[in-house]
Image (cartoon, rainbow, N blue to C red):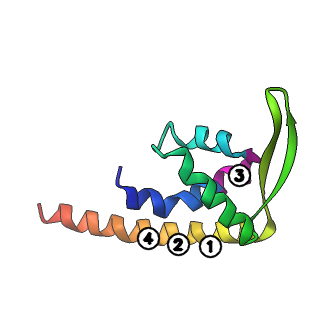
Amino acid sequence: MNIQFKKGALEFLVLLIIKGEDQYGYSLVQKITPRISIAEGTVYPLMRRLVKEGYLTTYFKPSTEGPARKYYKITEEGRERLKSLLAEWKDFTDAVNLFIEESEVDE
């Protein structure tokens, strides 16, 4: 899959997943990689940025498999950002789909 497509959608996907349920970094990667191949190292800088921008907060939760895990939780600002990204995504995909449909008519 085109790396630029992935880069453009990753923030959107992360916020969508965390909106449904708080996640720790590795669990988030595990949810994404069956559908979209990403390197684990690409998610952590994004998570730090989303926390810094106020879209996510963090907390630690004990783990039965080792040290406590850092979980990420969406904030109200994050929910607003997600709504904005969803609207932009729909507009973008609608426009792309129109181009695809128009090109198929010419075939």
**As drawn, which residue projects farthest toward the front?**
67
Q: Amino acid at mark 2?
A: Glu
Q: Which residue is more in the foreground, 99 or 26? A: 26
Q: Amino acid at mark 3?
A: Ile
Tell me: 39 left or right of 82. Answer: left
Labels 2 & 1 near each other (Cβ < 8 A): yes
Labels 2 & 3 near each other (Cβ < 8 A): no
Tell me: 24 left or right of 103. Answer: right
**As drawn, which residue projects farthest toward the left?**
107
Magenta segment: does it hold 91? no
**On the image, numbered disc 4 is attached to which residue?**
92
Q: Main secondary structure of the magenta part?
A: helix
**On the image, numbered disc 1 is attached to which residue?**
84
Tell me: 106 left or right of 13. Answer: left
Labels 4 & 3 near each other (Cβ < 8 A): no
As measured in the structure, the alpha-carbon distance from the residue carrying label 4 to the one carrying label 1 is 12 Å
Q: Amino acid at mark 1?
A: Ser
As measured in the structure, the alpha-carbon distance from the residue carrying label 2 to the one carrying label 1 is 6 Å
**On the image, numbered disc 2 is attached to which residue?**
88
Query: x%, y% of residue 98?
Result: 32, 68
Q: Quick one: label 2 or label 3, which is nearer the N terminus?
A: 3
As measured in the structure, the alpha-carbon distance from the residue carrying label 2 to the one carrying label 3 is 19 Å
Sort mark 2 into few (<14), some (14-19) or many (20+) by Cα contacts within 10 Å. few
| Residue at 19% in and 65% down | 103
Q: Quadrant of residue 16?
A: bottom right
| Residue at 67% in and 71% down | 81
Query: x%, y% of residue 65?
Result: 79, 26
**On the image, numbered disc 3 is attached to which residue?**
18
Sort mark 4 into few (<14), some (14-19) or many (20+) by Cα contacts within 10 Å. few
Q: Quick one: label 4 or label 1, which is nearer the N terminus?
A: 1
Relative vertical location of residue 32 with respect to residue 83 in this rendering, above or below:
above
Residues rendered magenta in the picture: 15-23
